[in-house]
Image (cartoon, rainbow, N blue to C red):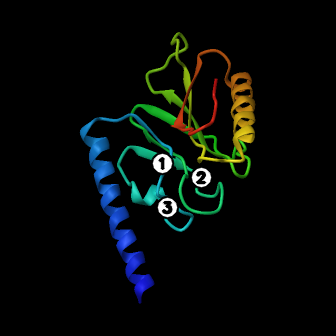
């Protein structure tokens, strides 16, 4: 009985967080949000929780066992064509927490300087033993996507890197 009450309290708190998050997105006219530590779990789908018209949620709740982390992207599809690259074109190594997408601005033309934007939300937990693996993954993905998409491609990587040295 106690466990069921705790689970119900967690669901209620998460629903409240989601409602506040959705309000923030709508009030501030957000185009893309990078979430480094979402509350998503394999049994608790973030896409269903953040159900906003004209937005898509890209995440990967299966990147490691345990709680915490789970990066995600929330993208306004009124402004961008969004293609999820996570575990399709870009394979995420087990233990690395990253979510990738390529955004094409709906106003982009052949003469646009910015034709596509690769976005990555990442998380590196404190004391992680996967730092080198994550850095290698970022470098390999940068080269893979640069070769695939060519000119007019730009990158935005954002997240909670803790002690990860990106320099």
Q: Which residue is mark 1?
A: 57
* Image quadrant assignment for residue 151: top right
Where residue 55 sits in the image (x, y, percent)? 41, 44
Task: Tell me how far mark 1 sits from mark 2, CA to CA.
Answer: 10 Å
Percent position of residue 71, x then y: 54, 47
**How dense is the environment of label 1, judged by Cα within 10 Å: few (below 14), some, or many (20 and up)?**
many
Judged from the image, the secondary structure of the residue bearing numbered disc 2 is loop
**Residue drawn at (33%, 69%) of the image:** 12
Q: Which residue is mark 2?
A: 60
Q: Quadrant of the C terminus?
A: top right
Q: Is residue 30 rendered to the left or right of residue 71?
A: left
Q: Specify the label residue 69 is tagged with.
A: none
**24 and 68: which is toward the camera:** 68
Helix, strand, or loop for circle 3? loop
Q: Quadrant of residue 27?
A: top left
The location of residue 89, given as percent across then percent down, is 71, 40
Does any portion of residue 89 appear in the rendered image?
A: no
The tag earlier along the polypeptide, 2 or 3, is 3
């Amino acid at each position: 009985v106690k466990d069921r009450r705790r689970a119900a309290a967690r669901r209620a708190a998460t629903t409240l967080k989601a409602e506040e998050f959705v309000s923030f997105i709508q009030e501030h006219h957000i185009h893309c949000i990078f979430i480094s530590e979402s509350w998503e779990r394999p049994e608790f789908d973030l896409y269903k929780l953040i159900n906003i018209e004209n937005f898509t949620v890209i995440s990967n709740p299966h990147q490691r066992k345990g709680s915490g982390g789970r990066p995600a992207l929330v993208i306004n599809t009124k402004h961008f064509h969004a293609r999820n690259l996570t575990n399709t074109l870009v394979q995420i190594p087990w233990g690395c927490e990253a979510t990738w997408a390529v955004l094409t601005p709906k106003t982009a033309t052949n003469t646009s300087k910015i034709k596509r934007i690769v976005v990555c939300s990442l998380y590196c937990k404190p004391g992680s033993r996967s730092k080198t693996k994550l850095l290698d993954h970022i470098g390999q993905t940068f080269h893979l996507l640069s070769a695939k998409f060519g000119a007019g491609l730009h990158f935005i990587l954002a997240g909670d890197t803790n002690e990860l040295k990106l320099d």
